[in-house]
Image (cartoon, rainbow, N blue to C red):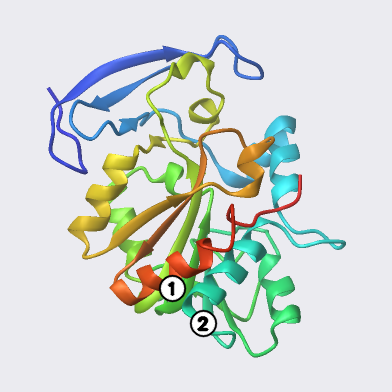
C-alpha cells in the first residue's frame, strides 16, 4: 500500500468515471489518502500548449478567466486583492505558472510602481521580467491561478512555490477543492493535466509543515460558472497578515475575480 506524499497516511487505489460532459465516460485511476483526503491521478498528465490547442472546452474556459486586449482577468484581481491585504501598492508581485496570460501587463498599467515578475518553467511571453522557478526571488504577493492541481510532486512543487513568499506577504492560489461529494459528477479532476485534487486538510498540512497559515475564500466566479468548489487558497506566515486579511474580508463578501 502506498503512502500519501503530503501526510504519510495510507492510500487506497481508486477509480473514478466521469458522468458529465465534456469528459463523460473518462475513467481515471489514482490514489486517495485515508487521512488528509488528497487524491492523486498520476496518469492524468497533459501539456499546456498542446492541450489548449486541441481541447476547445478548456480553451474557452481559459479565455474567460485570462486577460485579453479589452479587460483584465482573474490573476489581475487576485494580485490587486493581495496588494490591498499587505497594504503595499508598490508591492513586488510574482505570477507563478501564468503561461501566456497577460494579467501582469494589466497590473503594471494600473499600478506603475509595482514590480511584476513572471515565474514559470519557460519564458512563453519572452518577457524581460521573467524568472525561472529555480532562480525566482521572493515577493510580497505571489499569484498561482489554476496551478497547484498540476503538481505531480505535491510537496516538492509546493516548496518551489512557498519559498517565493516573503515573511509579511501572501500567496494566493486558485483551484477547485474536493469537498467529499461524488467525484463522478465533477468535471475538474478529469481535465488533462489535473493530477492533484486537493482537500482542505491536505493543504492545511502543507501550510503547517512549511511554517504557514492557510485560509480558504470563495471568489465571485465561484457563484456562477466556477462552481461551489472553486476557492482561493491564501497562505501567509504572520499573524499580522491574518488581521489584515480579516480586515479585508470584513468589508468584502467574496474574493474578487474575473467577471462572469
Question: In the figure, is residue 117 to the left or right of 241?
Answer: right
- Determine if residue 119 is in view: no
At a point 15% along the width and 27% down the height, the residue shown is: 2
At a point 51% along the width and 82% down the height, the residue shown is: 87
Question: In the figure, is residue 69 to the left or right of 187?
Answer: right
| Crowd class of label 1 (few under 14; some 14 to 19; many from 20; radius 10 Å) | some
From the top left corner, tell me how far across and down residue 33 is, in percent.
22, 29
Point out the frontmost of discs 1 and 2: 1
Question: Which residue is nearer to you in this view: 233 or 146?
Answer: 233
Q: Which residue is mark 2?
A: 87
Q: Are marks 1 and 2 in contact (CB under 8 Å)?
A: yes
From the top left corner, tell me how far across and down residue 177 is, in percent.
44, 37
| Crowd class of label 2 (few under 14; some 14 to 19; many from 20; radius 10 Å) | some
The residue positioned farthest toward the right in the image shown:
70
At a point 58% along the width and 67% down the height, the residue shown is: 81
Rendered image quadrant of residue 12: top left
Up the image or down, 184 lies above or below 239; here it is above
Question: In the figure, is residue 86 to the left or right of 134?
Answer: right
The quarter in which the C terminus is drawn is top right
Question: In the figure, is residue 146 to the left or right of 67?
Answer: left
Mark 1 secondary-structure assignment: helix
The quarter in which the N terminus is drawn is top left
Up the image or down, 248 lies above or below 6; here it is below
Rendered image quadrant of residue 9: top left
Q: How far apart are the two marked residues, 1 and 2, measured between alpha carbons?
A: 8 Å
Q: Earlier in the sequence, mark 1 or mark 2?
A: 2
Q: Which residue is mark 1?
A: 244
Q: Which label is found at residue 119? A: none
Question: Which residue is nearer to you in this view: 220 or 98?
Answer: 220
Amino acid at each position: 500500500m502506498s503512502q500519501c506524499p503530503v501526510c504519510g497516511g495510507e492510500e487506497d487505489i481508486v477509480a473514478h468515471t466521469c458522468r458529465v460532459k465534456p469528459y463523460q465516460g473518462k475513467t481515471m485511476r489514482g490514489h486517495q489518502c485515508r487521512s488528509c483526503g488528497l487524491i492523486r491521478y498520476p496518469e492524468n498528465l497533459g501539456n499546456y500548449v498542446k492541450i489548449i490547442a486541441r481541447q476547445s472546452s478548456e480553451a474557452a474556459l481559459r479565455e474567460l478567466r485570462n486577460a485579453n486586449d479589452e479587460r483584465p482577468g482573474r490573476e489581475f484581481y487576485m494580485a490587486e486583492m493581495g496588494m490591498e491585504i499587505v497594504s503595499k501598492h508598490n508591492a513586488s508581485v510574482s505570477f507563478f505558472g501564468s503561461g501566456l496570460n497577460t494579467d501582469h501587463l494589466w497590473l503594471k498599467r494600473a499600478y506603475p510602481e509595482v514590480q511584476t515578475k513572471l515565474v514559470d518553467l519557460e519564458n512563453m511571453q519572452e518577457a524581460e521580467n521573467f524568472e525561472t522557478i529555480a532562480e525566482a526571488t521572493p515577493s510580497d504577493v505571489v499569484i498561482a491561478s489554476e496551478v497547484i492541481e498540476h503538481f505531480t510532486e505535491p510537496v516538492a512543487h509546493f516548496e518551489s512555490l512557498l519559498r517565493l513568499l516573503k515573511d509579511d506577504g501572501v500567496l494566493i492560489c486558485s483551484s477547485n477543492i474536493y469537498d467529499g461529494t461524488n467525484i463522478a459528477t465533477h468535471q475538474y479532476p478529469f481535465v488533462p493535466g489535473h493530477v492533484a485534487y486537493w482537500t482542505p486538510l491536505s493543504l492545511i498540512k502543507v501550510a503547517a509543515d512549511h511554517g504557514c497559515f492557510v485560509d480558504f475564500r470563495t471568489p465571485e466566479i465561484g457563484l456562477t460558472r466556477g462552481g461551489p468548489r472553486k476557492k482561493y487558497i491564501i497562505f501567509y506566515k504572520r499573524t499580522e497578515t491574518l488581521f489584515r486579511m480579516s480586515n479585508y474580508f470584513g468589508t468584502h463578501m467574496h474574493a474578487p475575480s474575473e467577471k462572469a
